[in-house]
């Protein structure tokens, strides 16, 4: 499951659900206007760039003004109930706009579209089109259907679609960082998660197409890429097809297969000056080879998002997380031994069905052992269609969930402050991404460990790698002074 690292333009409810409006400079004055909103994880944001690319070839120019739109698309998330509630509220807004623009068409994309399918057309009368994550190449045909007055649906999950042949349109880009999707789908049937049902089985993208995209991004001036997948550690290219079918591959396919550690090395060598991140990892699939590749190549960032979800072995088993608490500790120990300055973040769910106070204490003691740099923490919300919803009663009271969540958040905030304070007095490389939100006189960027840093602008520019002496910090931000350009420029 992807982490909740929303790289977005506008905050909505909380850090668990954010949305962005994507825009592209018009190439002509004659195209129809496309308005896209994206909610959820980085993969949805990346998918919206693919959608914009496909529709730009059909004469659509994107706009940030809803009042101008001829076609409105909302790319949805089903990972939590709040995500779906947010989308329904947005559909109400679109309905009000449509009364003023009756020709305007509205489509729902993404995981929520896949999960609810025809219900959108039946319940949400505003919706003209429902398109699942694997059907975006069919958008031109679906739009023709709705132009002719018929509702259109395509939510068929694919066994091989990865959009590797589609060059994404970089929307609202800072020109410095970009996403590169490498896998789609997930085979890890965590009982709380809808992703396997909304995005299908795992399949990986041709490594050469990934390297080609990274090379093109470098040529366009980008300085950092994030390799994306529901579970990047499961990346496995053996010529195409689902990962689950690898055992039936030929000896030649197996001998020439590329796993995630090998892909990391290929990308690092292809562009040694571009910074590389990846998300998300699953503890049961992360290998020592991946960690060693990170340590070997300077341009692979020292940061791993490593969701654990619970510190209790009993709850991990109920979640169908195929690792134990002790196995997770061993992985953490290996990461810290091989990459001592590696930052680690977590996803944590509290209040999972049958969770007791002892289970909750196990989560707190796991956090004390790891001392994560960052965290993304949520109270359990039942997702229809998952095994947990079918088999387990949501029996932890809301007030108990809220209290346990508060305790987890408070502990993470303390650990985050402890971890960031260790950087004060050090000089670290920062990639400038833009102007600080709090001061026009300061740049904002991130370190290799994904920590935000701000410092006076002076004569530097967006996209520069700058060495910054860290003089102070808040609980989430380093404050420093630039001492010169990095050798990576």
Image (cartoon, helix red, strand yellow):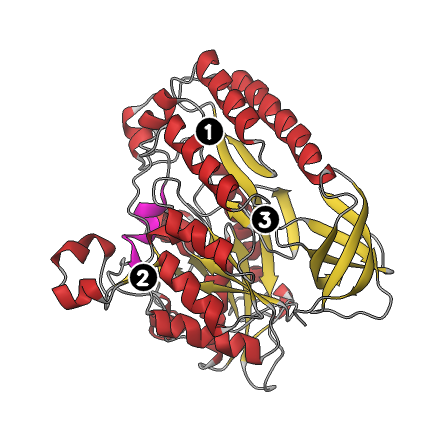
Q: Indicate yes or no whether the magenta region holds residue 200.
A: yes
* Residue that numbered label 2 is attached to: 204
| Crowding at mark 1 (Cα within 10 Å: few <14, some 14-19, many 20+) | many
Percent position of residue 469, x then y: 80, 53
In which image quadrant can residue 193 be found? top left
Name the residue rendered at 63%, 68% in the picture.
176
**Numbered label attached to residue 265:** none
Mark 1 → mark 3, Cα distance in angstroms:
18 Å
Sequence-first tag of 3 and 2: 3
What SS does tag 2 mark?
A: strand
Which residues make up the magenta segment?
A: 194-203
Task: Point out the tag, 1 or 3, that comes first from the N-terminus.
Answer: 3
Mark 2 and 1 residues: CB-CB less than 8 Å, in contact? no
- Badge count: 3
Residue beneath disc 3: 18
Residue 168 in view of the camera? no
x and y percent of residue 268 in the render?
48, 66
Q: Are marks 1 and 3 in contact (CB under 8 Å)?
A: no
Residue 99 in percent (x, y) is at 57, 60
Kindly identify the residue that appears in the image at 33 percent across and 37 percent down.
190
Q: Position of residue 439 (x, y in %)?
A: 85, 55
Task: Determine whether 213 is above or below 293 in the image.
Answer: below
Q: Nearer the viewer, residue 118 or 223?
A: 223
Secondary-structure class at tag 3: strand
- Crowding at mark 3 (Cα within 10 Å: few <14, some 14-19, many 20+): many
From the image, which quarter does the N terminus lie in?
A: top left
Give the residue number, with chain letter if any, for mark 1: 380
Asked where in the image residue 443 lies, by quadrant, the reply is bottom right
Mark nearer the N terminus (2 vs 1): 2
- C-alpha gap between disc 2 and disc 1: 30 Å
Q: Which quarter of the figure has residue 26? A: bottom right
Give the residue drawn at x 63%, y 25%.
411
């Amino acid at each position: 499951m992807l982490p909740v690292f929303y790289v977005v333009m506008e905050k909505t409810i909380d850090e668990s659900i954010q949305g962005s409006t994507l825009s592209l400079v018009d190439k002509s004055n004659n195209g129809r206007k496309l308005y896209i909103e994206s909610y959820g994880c980085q993969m949805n944001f990346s998918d919206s760039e693919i959608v914009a690319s496909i529709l730009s070839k059909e004469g659509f120019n994107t706009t940030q003004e809803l009042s101008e739109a001829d076609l409105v698309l909302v790319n949805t998330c089903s990972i939590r109930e709040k995500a779906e509630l947010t989308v329904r509220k947005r559909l109400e807004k679109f309905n009000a706009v449509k009364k003023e623009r009756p020709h305007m068409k509205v489509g729902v994309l993404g995981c929520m579209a896949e999960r609810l399918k025809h219900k959108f057309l039946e319940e949400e009368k505003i919706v003209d089109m429902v398109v699942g994550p694997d059907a975006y190449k069919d958008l031109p045909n679906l739009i023709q259907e709705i132009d002719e007055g018929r509702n259109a649906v395509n939510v068929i999950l694919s066994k091989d679609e990865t959009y590797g042949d589609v060059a994404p349109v970089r929307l609202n880009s800072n020109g410095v960082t970009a996403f590169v999707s490498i896998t789609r789908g997930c085979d890890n049937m965590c009982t709380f998660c809808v992703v396997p049902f909304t995005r299908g089985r795992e399949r990986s993208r041709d490594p050469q197409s990934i390297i080609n995209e990274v090379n093109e991004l470098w040529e366009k001036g980008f300085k950092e890429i994030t390799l994306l997948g529901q579970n990047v550690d499961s990346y496995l290219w053996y010529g195409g097809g689902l990962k689950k079918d690898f055992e039936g591959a030929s000896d030649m396919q197996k001998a020439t297969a590329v796993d995630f550690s090998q892909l990391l090395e290929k990308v690092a060598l292809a562009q040694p000056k571009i910074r590389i991140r990846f998300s998300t990892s699953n503890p049961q699939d992360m290998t020592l080879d991946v960690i060693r590749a990170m340590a070997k190549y300077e341009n692979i960032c020292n940061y791993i998002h490593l969701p654990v979800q619970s510190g209790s072995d009993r709850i991990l088993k109920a979640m169908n997380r195929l690792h134990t608490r002790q196995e997770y500790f061993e992985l953490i120990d290996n990461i810290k031994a091989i990459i001592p300055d590696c930052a680690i973040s977590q996803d944590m769910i509290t209040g999972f069905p049958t969770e007791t106070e002892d289970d909750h204490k196990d989560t707190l003691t796991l956090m004390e052992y790891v001392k994560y740099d960052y965290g993304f923490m949520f109270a359990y919300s039942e997702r229809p269609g998952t095994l947990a919803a079918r088999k387990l009663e949501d029996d932890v009271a809301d007030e108990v969930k809220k209290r346990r969540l508060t305790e987890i958040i408070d502990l993470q905030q303390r650990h985050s402050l402890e971890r960031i304070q260790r950087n004060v007095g050090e000089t670290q490389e920062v990639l400038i991404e833009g102007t600080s939100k709090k001061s026009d006189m300061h740049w904002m960027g991130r370190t290799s460990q994904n920590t935000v840093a701000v410092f006076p602008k002076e004569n530097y520019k967006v996209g520069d790698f700058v060495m910054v002496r860290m003089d102070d910090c808040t609980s989430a931000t380093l404050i420093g002074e630039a001492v010169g350009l990095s050798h990576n420029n």
